[in-house]
Image (spheres, rainbow, N blue to C red):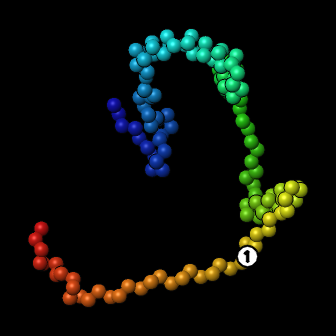
């Protein structure tokens, strides 16, 4: 098999794969055993849909819908044009606190100076006579 070439940036060349053999195949005997369990799994989902446990019924319903209709897509809008994310974050927090009537706004003074860290302890010097010379031991 030919070596896969990478760019200097660590990315693969266009058309090249970092996993040329692909995803490992499921062994045929395992595939056959799983296929034989399909009806049992469908029956278990049917039983869960008809059961008394509300959480189990919801999970079974979601599984049926996801398999038949596909999982719902989630989308989000993100503004990446903000230049000062700290100021934007502070403005968003202030606005959220103003909207909240359940509790008063929390004000944090971020301009206060921090106290300096305590000095590190100093160790006493080691006398040179206590250090063995390099030629006293054998390799």
Kindly identify which residue carries mark 1. Answer: 111
Q: In this picture, is 117 found above or below 2? A: below
Task: Decide if residue 139 is in sight here.
Answer: yes
Q: In which quarter of the image is residue 128?
A: bottom left
Q: Which residue is drawn at 48% across and 16% down?
A: 34
User: Is residue 93 rendered to the left or right of residue 118?
Assistant: right
Near-viewer residue (138 or 19): 138
Instruction: Indicate the quadrant containing the N terminus: top left, top right, bottom left or bottom right.
Output: top left
- Residue 112 lies, in percent from the top left, at 72, 78
Q: Residue at x 56, y 80 (%)?
A: 117
Q: Residue at x 42, y 17 (%)?
A: 30
Near-viewer residue (42 or 70): 42
**SS state under label 1:** loop
Near-viewer residue (75 or 60): 60
Q: Which residue is drawn at 70% across and 21% down?
A: 52
Q: In which quarter of the image is residue 104?
A: bottom right
Near-viewer residue (82 or 8): 82
- Residue 107 lies, in percent from the top left, at 80, 68
Q: In which quarter of the image is residue 85?
A: bottom right
Q: In this picture, is 25 found above or below 95? A: above
User: Is residue 108 rendered to the left or right of residue 26?
Assistant: right
- Residue 36 lies, in percent from the top left, at 49, 10
Task: Decide if residue 65 is in sight here.
Answer: no
């Amino acid at each position: 098999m030919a070596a896969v070439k990478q760019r200097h940036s660590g990315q693969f060349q266009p058309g090249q794969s970092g996993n040329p053999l692909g995803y490992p195949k499921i062994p045929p005997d395992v595939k056959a055993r799983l296929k034989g369990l399909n009806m049992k799994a469908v029956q278990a989902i049917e039983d869960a849909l008809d059961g008394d446990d509300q959480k189990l019924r919801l999970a079974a319903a979601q599984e049926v819908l996801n398999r038949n209709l596909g999982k719902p897509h989630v989308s989000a809008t993100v503004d990446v044009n903000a230049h000062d994310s700290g100021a934007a974050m502070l403005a968003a927090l202030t606005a959220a606190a103003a909207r909240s009537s359940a509790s008063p706004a929390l004000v944090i003074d971020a301009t206060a100076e921090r106290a300096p860290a305590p000095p590190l302890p100093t160790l006493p010097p080691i006398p040179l006579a206590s250090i063995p010379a390099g030629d006293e031991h054998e390799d």
